[in-house]
Image: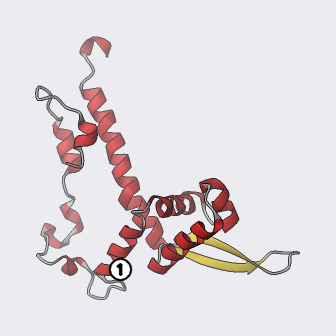
Amino acid sequence: MLFSKFLGLTKAKSLPPVFWSKMAIDQTRTIGGDFPDDPEDLLPTDGILSLDEYLEMHAAVGHRTRYEICYRLVHGGEMSPKELEEVISIDDSTLHYHLNKLVDVGLIEKRQHTERGQDGLYTYYRATVFGEVTLSEGIDELIRGEQEFEEMYDSSTTPESES
């Protein structure tokens, strides 16, 4: 169902075999290629996060504003709340609500420091390793997969006379 939105295939068309190999589950990421019955068993025995904490991270970036904040911080680096307000076009209170949610689940971190020649503390946010991985191996990877599929499908259906 997930891919039906962009496949747009007629019954006469078939998917190239390379599509299925690209979209297959990567079983090399599990021990021995087997999937455990209980998803909790995927976690390392000495892991620092619970399954619920991983799920909370993914749920947090499931909100468009929080995804965009993470995206900006992962791909653009450390930013102040003012910079985020400007690029996302969001009011201060809404931004801070979402920033706090992302800090709470560990996807971003808040840093405060002084600026040379300035008084007071300045606040900046940056993505954590968990934020970078959640984005790059999650939603960003799904988007790249769709783009690769479209390119693959477009090139496989081009009539030979156009090649």
Residue 139: in sight, yes or no?
yes
Q: Which residue is the extreme one toward the bottom?
A: 46
Residue 80: in sight, yes or no?
no
Residue drawn at (12%, 69%), measured in percent from left and top?
Answer: 34
| Residue 103 at x, y percent in the picture | 52, 77
148 to 70, vertically: above or below: above
Display colour scheme: secondary structure
Q: Would you say 59 lies left or right of 21 here?
A: right
Helix, strand, or loop for circle 1? helix
87 to 116, vertically: above or below: above
Label 1 is placed on what type of residue?
A: Glu
Residue 152, quarter of picture:
top left
| Residue 155 at x, y percent in the picture | 29, 27
Residue drawn at (59%, 67%), measured in percent from left and top?
Answer: 95
Reading the image, the residue beneath label 1 is: 53
Q: Would you say 77 lies left or right of 23 here?
A: right
48 to 66, vertically: above or below: below
Q: Which residue is the extreme one toward the top?
A: 161
The image shows a total of numbered marks equal to 1
Residue drawn at (69%, 80%), measured in percent from left and top?
Answer: 112
| Residue 56 at x, y percent in the picture | 36, 75
| Residue 4 at x, y percent in the picture | 22, 42
